[in-house]
Amino acid sequence: MARTPAKPKARESERPDGPSRVILLTGLEAERKQAEALEYLKQADPDFADFDAETLDGSHASAEQVLGAVGTVPFGNGKKVVLLRDTQQLDTEEQKRLAAGLDRIPPQGLLVLHTGSPIIEDGKTKRGSAVSTELANAVKKLGEVRDFALPKVEDLRGHLIQEARRLGKTLDSEALALLSQLPADDVRHIGTELEKAALHAGTNAKITAADVEATLSRGPDDVIFKLCDAVGMRKPKEALQHVNTLFRGSSRPDSVAPRTLVLLARQIRLVMQFRFLGEKKMAGRNAQPVSPQVAALLPADGAASILANPRTAWMADKYIGQARNFTLPELEERLEKLLNADLALKGSLPGGDNPQAVLQRLVIELC
């Protein structure tokens, strides 16, 4: 499962017409994607890196600026490398202009298009959270697209078991489940957490859930998951405490609210699906199997797939319990509240200039 990023210089001859002049880095595994982007910058002459390695930001760059930078003759013996971060934030028209101009990149130029993690809702990529199809197709034609997909749960579990063996340990089932729940966009972080748990286990041959709990670093996503569960259990006081923790511990408060909103929406949708299944006697005590007709009404990555997969079926009990706290009309109303919060954060409704206040108001409405 562990995939080591290929060194850029070893990949230069992959295209039959010579080294690639443009590379698009996509996918959800942020850590490897970021490391790969930085590796490409090393193709500039290190003695002239201040001039020949340039980083731009997609949130306020233009196609003309990007193409002009990568078209500059390098001072050193390496390439002129331009790294464009968060390319998906380029205006749609600017992405079209960039796509049209990629064939103008000279042989000594290298444009690296880095993208942020796309937002997935109901199994589909949210519009505006990934680069345009036109730009992606242009890169495929003229260069390379490298997708850093998240490891599947099964792959991650296998990787953890192998890494534990390398450390001279085994993992009990609860410890493996805890580590497998960590955000898979940072495999290195998961490996670090495993090593810490192994050290805590000491001379014991088996790493237990207690070892993992004792050493686990609590990141922002962990707090968000606790917030989601507090909402599902209708505990507004606890939910507000988690909101305050999120903003108190973040160096970029403007990025906290959108991520939290995505996961809250996912939580409400899953609770709603389990409520729907519960009313059809297909979830909960003495439940019947989910019929193909009902499964077809639900998202491919939703409640039905959680119940059907033995590796995730244990999660169903949590959602079934939370679903008992709401009626379907109440959950439909909460989806509307989530939409209003999203519009406020995007400036389409008033009150979005304070993201923390938007989330505080939202969790009260959701609970």
Image: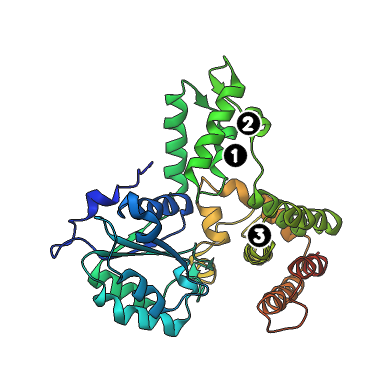
How far across and how far down the image is residue 249, in percent?
72, 51
Q: Mark 2 and mark 1 in contact? Answer it, CB < 8 Å.
A: yes
The disc placed on residue 178 is: 1
Identify the residue position indicated by label 3 in the image.
252
Question: How far apart are the alpha carbons under marks 3 and 1?
Answer: 27 Å
How far across and how far down the image is residue 279, in percent?
68, 65
Foreground pick, 29 / 102: 102
What SS does tag 2 mark? helix
- Which amino acid is tagged 1? Leu
- Which amino acid is tagged 3? Arg
Q: Vertical placement of 119 versus 194: above or below?
A: below
Quarter assignment of residue 177? top right
Question: Which residue is outermost to the left?
Answer: 16
Question: How far apart are the alpha carbons under marks 2 and 3?
Answer: 32 Å
Q: Vertical placement of 133 versus 195: above or below?
A: below
What SS does tag 1 mark? helix
Whichever of labels 3 and 1 marks the residue nearer the N terminus, that label is 1
From the image, state whether disc 2 or disc 3 is nearer to you. 3
The disc placed on residue 209 is: 2
Q: Quadrant of the C terminus?
A: bottom right
Image side of residue 363 versus residue 125, left or right: right
Residue 199 visible to an observer of this rendering:
yes
Whichever of labels 2 and 3 marks the residue nearer the N terminus, that label is 2
